[in-house]
Image (cartoon, rainbow, N blue to C red):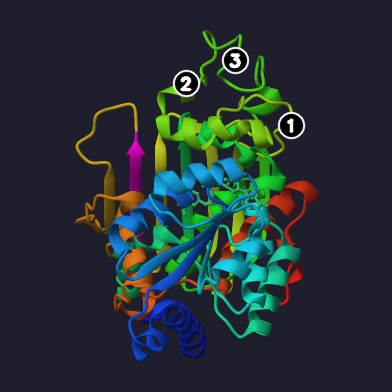
Amino acid sequence: MSETNGLNRRDFVKTASTAAAASLMLGGVARAAAPRAKRRYAIVGTGERASGMWGRDLVQKYSDVLEFVGLCDINPKRAAAARELIGVDCPTYSNFDEMMDRSKPDLLMVTTVDFFHRDYIVKGLERGVNVMTEKPMTTHEDKCQDILDAEKKAGKNIVVTFNYRYAPKHQKIKEILMSGEIGRVLSVDFSWYLDTSHGADYFRRWHRLKRGGGSLWVHKATHHFDLINWWLGADPVEVSAQGSLEVYGSAGPFRHTNCRPCPHKAKCRFYYDMTKDAKRMKLYASAEDVDGYHRDGCVFREDVDIYDSMSAVVQYSNGVHMSYSLNAHMPIEGYRLAFNGEFGRLEVRDYERQPWAVAEESEMYVIKSGKTGAAGTRTKVVVPDVRGGHGGGDDVMRDIIFRDRQVPEHMRLPGSRAGAMSCLTGIAARKSVEEKKPIKISDLVKL
Ligand SMILES: NC(=O)c1ccc[n+]([C@@H]2O[C@H](COP(=O)([O-])OP(=O)(O)OC[C@H]3O[C@@H](n4cnc5c(N)ncnc54)[C@H](O)[C@@H]3O)[C@@H](O)[C@H]2O)c1
């Protein structure tokens, strides 16, 4: 296998230089040449992610290079609560244009409900501001096209914060594939399991609607599809998928608006007592009179229009095909993954939570075929055990963004192409379920 793992050299250089440009855009050359002024940083969508990973954590670790200049949310009470939680005194806004006019950020973080990412990414680019967005880059193909067009027009590069890539265990997988140890990868088996705690949580919130997160095919699986695109160094070409709603939504036995006033709480296996979480009470309960948004919404509401049981077959530009599944009501949380190569197989089991006690939550093996009639070999890979959000990936990624941490080419920041290719895989899967036919990525957007 070539070092670029299935990607031809010309494509690799193109992809790598795009990623490098994204890295430089956020922190490299331009800043190094100028006096070391703090970056003027603004956030739109001040919920949990903005308050923590892109808020309080940044104040604690990057205050020497970053100045918070504005926080914007359609819910002004939540923006005010977020400001307190983050621990800054910058102005809060409920009007995005007003924030941009007054606070004049040079870096905008987009952490709204996924469905609205497009609007703020495009507006930010049109104002010539550097934009970072949480995943998924967007939820629908027309929005994806708008972002790609706006980026091209603005001559800027956006960054899509795919933190999973930066988990040391995921870097290890990339290194093994690049080393050529199992030969050319021919197919992939990938199953992701969300348990009845994390998985159920998506059905409590805006994620339960396609108009919120584009379904878990997009909101959640964009992470997994990005990992696969990056690991394989390939683009998705066509997706065939099946999906159904089996446990949550209208499949449930009873329902109410949300958990706190629910008459069924004693018998409901998904009852969630948000009053025990002071941060969520502040961020959501204290602001729900403004927008009626319940963070502890009932998982059995009739309006749930996404799937909790999903399977897909994805074909890639380098001939690899993947069978993928995502289930959101499992007794375990984590994934099983195997790359089937010419000479062997890389096998990974990574469980974050499971109901039994095991010494190791992660196992990784390189298994090689023997000659005919002879046994092969199985070599255990030492999985880096790093603490911190998303397997230690959050800290690595933030250091690349805010400290200009120098990294090898394959670790450069993901840009709009990665954002598009991963969300389009999910969009194609969703459309394949809806339209009952395979969907080609090239029919969704013009790159
Ligand atoms: N990378 C990861 O691992 C990871 C983890 C969690 C969340 N996320 C992403 O972060 C983003 C935010 O998620 P969250 O968990 O903080 O959700 P959240 O519900 O806590 O916050 C979303 C905020 O957006 C606001 N909002 C909604 N519509 C808006 C609009 N039109 N304009 C301005 N603000 C609007 C809401 O009022 C809310 O405060 C999502 O895109 C999500 O996919 C990523």
Q: Position of residue 75 (x, y in %)?
A: 62, 44
What is the C-alpha distance between the residues marked 2 and 1? Answer: 22 Å
Q: Position of residue 436 (x, y in %)?
A: 78, 49
Label 1 secondary element: loop
Name the residue: 36% across, 91% down. 33
Label 2 secondary element: loop
Viewer-nearest residue: 107 or 177: 107
Which span is picked out in magenta? Answer: 345-353
Name the residue: 69% across, 51% down. 430
The single residue placed furthest to the right in the displayed view is 435
What is the C-alpha distance between the residues marked 3 and 1? Answer: 19 Å
In the picture, the quarter occupied by the C terminus is bottom right
Q: Eyeballing the image, is 108 above or below 385? A: below
Q: Name the residue under label 1.
A: 303
Label 3 secondary element: loop
Q: Name the residue under label 2.
A: 273
Q: Eyeballing the image, is 398 above or below 1? A: above
Identify the amino acid type marked 2.
Answer: Asp
From the viewer's perspective, is 435 left or right of 255?
Answer: right
Residue 313: say if magenta. no
Viewer-nearest residue: 371 or 390: 390
Identify the amino acid type marked 3.
Answer: Pro
Can the viewer see residue 372?
A: no
Q: Mark 3 points at which residue?
A: 261
Decide: few, some or many residues near mark 1? Use Cα within 10 Å; few <14, some 14-19, many ≥20: few
Can the viewer see residue 29?
A: yes
